[in-house]
Image (spheres, rainbow, N blue to C red):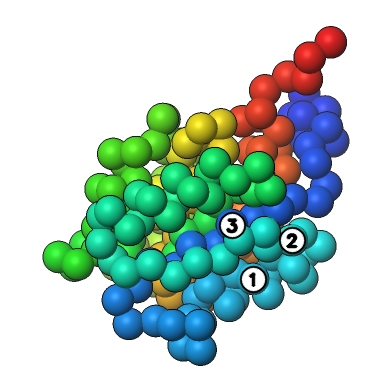
Amino acid sequence: MSLEQHKSAAPARLRFAVVTISDTRNTVTDRGGEFLVESITGAGHAVALREIVRDEREEIAAAVRRAAADSEVDLVLTTGGTGIAPRDVTFDTLRGILDSEIPGFGELFRWLSYREIGSATILSRALGGLLGGKVVLALPGSPKALKLAMDEIVLKEAGHLVSQARGPKPQ
């Protein structure tokens, strides 16, 4: 099947989970999560679940597992905690729970980011993978980085990612 055939078979409307990872954000100050919600709904998709958790391994793992297990969620996005500061444990936590990784996501994000911020892009540990048959994409917390990820990767490939993660439809 060609790339065009794959993409044409992808679902047109998806249901996302948005998990913000932050020790300092709440529903009023969560600019990254709000940006994701606006970007998702603006593209004609839905947000089935939204949650804010502290930058704690157990909370991150539990929230992402809940989101991936939710039958109303097609794709999980996290925002925050992907840097290299000691409190940024998202990358290591997700790497520990994902069934498999999608290395091209982080690679492409950093390549695109390099065009905007130069070599500082090495500080980003954006990550993609699969958990329980669901796509999980860990994004930075910066609205500018989120815009780049959503416009250049996520919204363009979300349906294709979801359809591939689900596998072929039974005959």
- Using the numbered discs, state the Cα–Cα distance from disc 1 to disc 3 in whole angstroms: 9 Å
User: Which residue shows up at 44% across the image and 70% down it?
Assistant: 52
Task: Please state which amino acid type lies under the numbered disc 3.
Answer: Ala
Say which mark, if any, is on residue 37: 1
Query: Callout 1: few (<14), some (14-19), or many (20+) C-alpha neighbours within 10 Å?
Result: some
The residue tagged 2 is 46
Res 110 → quadrant: bottom left
User: Which residue shows up at 78% across the image and 20% down it?
Assistant: 169
Let me know if residue 153 appears in the view. Answer: no
Residue farthest along the bottom direction in this orientation:
28
Q: Judge whether 106 appears above or below 17 on screen.
A: above
Q: Judge whether 130 appears above or below 168 on screen.
A: below
Q: Name the spot of residue 92 as percent of width and height, x first.
A: 25, 48
- Using the numbered discs, state the Cα–Cα distance from disc 1 to disc 2 in whole angstroms: 8 Å
Left or right, residue 157 beside residue 77: right
Query: Callout 3: few (<14), some (14-19), or many (20+) C-alpha neighbours within 10 Å?
Result: many
